[in-house]
Amino acid sequence: MENFSPISALIGGALIGLSAGLLWIINGRIAGIAGILGNVVPVRENEVGWRLVFLAALAIGAGLAWHLGPAIAPSLAIVTPTQSTPLGLLVIAGLLVGIGTRLSNGCTSGHGVCGLARLSPRSLAAVLTFMLLGVVTVTVVRHLI
Amino acid sequence: MTRNALQATINVVAGLLFGVGLTISGMIDPKKVKDFLDFAAIPTGGWDPSLAFVMGGAVIVAFFFYRFAGARPVAADRYHPATYTRIDARLLGGAAVFGIGWGLSGLCPGPAIADLAIVPGDVILFIAAMAAGSWATGLFLAWQRRRELPLGNAPAE
């Protein structure tokens, strides 16, 4: 468990929870990224702008933290993303994530953060299901193929 | 500050916080996500439980906001909660399909968008495929509702 980073994980998680909480109590919106992204495509007036701005701010926040984080808070374990999935498989994975999150109306943030925080049985069922299939998939790819 | 200005400000602040949180938590790294899903590596010490701490921290903080939210949002007319509340084949099947894609790539929607600003490249293709999959599924669901020919359990939205 040499890469386990519980403190950074808790701090980062708390910031995500703060984001979801503020978006709910002030704007009345669920911070589910799949839902926010999925509803950017079918253009409906007044429903698209805030979603694009939220997604742009998310990318900017992540980029700023990655560039400035190591200088500001050197004790945090800031990692560099490494993607090892072959390109064809990555596109198939993208399709599966798009189809699956649309069918189940949520992803790791919509069900995993907002849904669980609202004690939704539906979200708990979704989280247990995608966790199980994620574990099975990684096990097959890393250990059985 | 007017209500609209407050709403727009919170939208940006929440987006920034979400992105900063993803980077600090390490969830921007697909390898770290796969290392969490790799339960088979527990006996050899290769498992990384970080993701559970990220989700736990996020859920605990968000819980208090949801629990103590007012009757109406501070800067909006109403809440926009999830409208589809049944546990059915569509929910579980969709979550299963998502889980396979998540396990294959180590990416889910939030980190994919974050990685656009950190390591732009192949992740763009992932996002394009994800948007296409979501869009096509949305069209299919709308068509199914119009035809009133439910698959298994009737989806209602």
Image: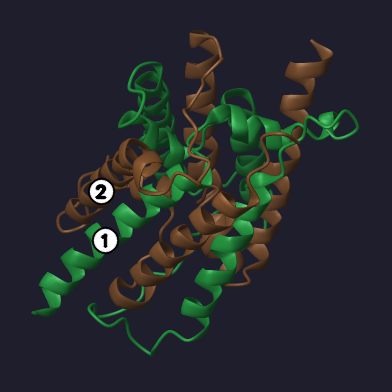
Chain colours: A brown, B green
**Cβ atoms under marks 2 and 1 closer than 8 Å:** yes
**Which numbered tag is attached to residue B44?**
none
Residue A121 visible in the shown view: yes
Q: Give x and y (percent) for residue B60.
A: 59, 70
Residue that sits furthest to the left in the current view:
B2
Decide which of B86, A74 is in the foreground and name it: A74
* Disc 2 residue type (three-letter): Ala
What secondary structure is marked by label 2? helix
Q: Can residue B149 be seen by looking at this rendering?
A: no
- The percent position of residue A18, horizontal first and vertical second, equals 43, 67
**Residue visible at 46% across and 78% down?**
B65
Q: Which mark is residue B13?
A: 1
Q: Quadrant of residue A38?
A: top left
Callout 1: residue from which chain? B
Q: Residues within 10 Å of mark 1 (few under 14, many from 20)?
A: some
Which quarter shows the C terminus of chain A? Answer: top right
Q: Nearer the viewer, residue B45 or B125?
A: B45
Residue B154 place in picture, x, y as percent: 59, 54
Amino acid at the residue labelled 1: Val
Question: Which residue is at 34% across, 29% downward?
Answer: B118
User: Looking at the picture, do discs 2 and 1 lie on one chain?
Assistant: no
| Side of A142 where A43 appears, left or right | left
Residue A2 image-quadrant placement: top right
The answer to whether residue A32 is above or below residue A95 is below
The residue to which callout 2 is attached is A57
Tell which of B93 and A13 is nearer to you: A13
Left or right, residue A20 beside residue A47: right
Element at badge 1? helix
Q: Residues within 10 Å of mark 2 (few under 14, many from 20)?
A: many
Total count of labels: 2
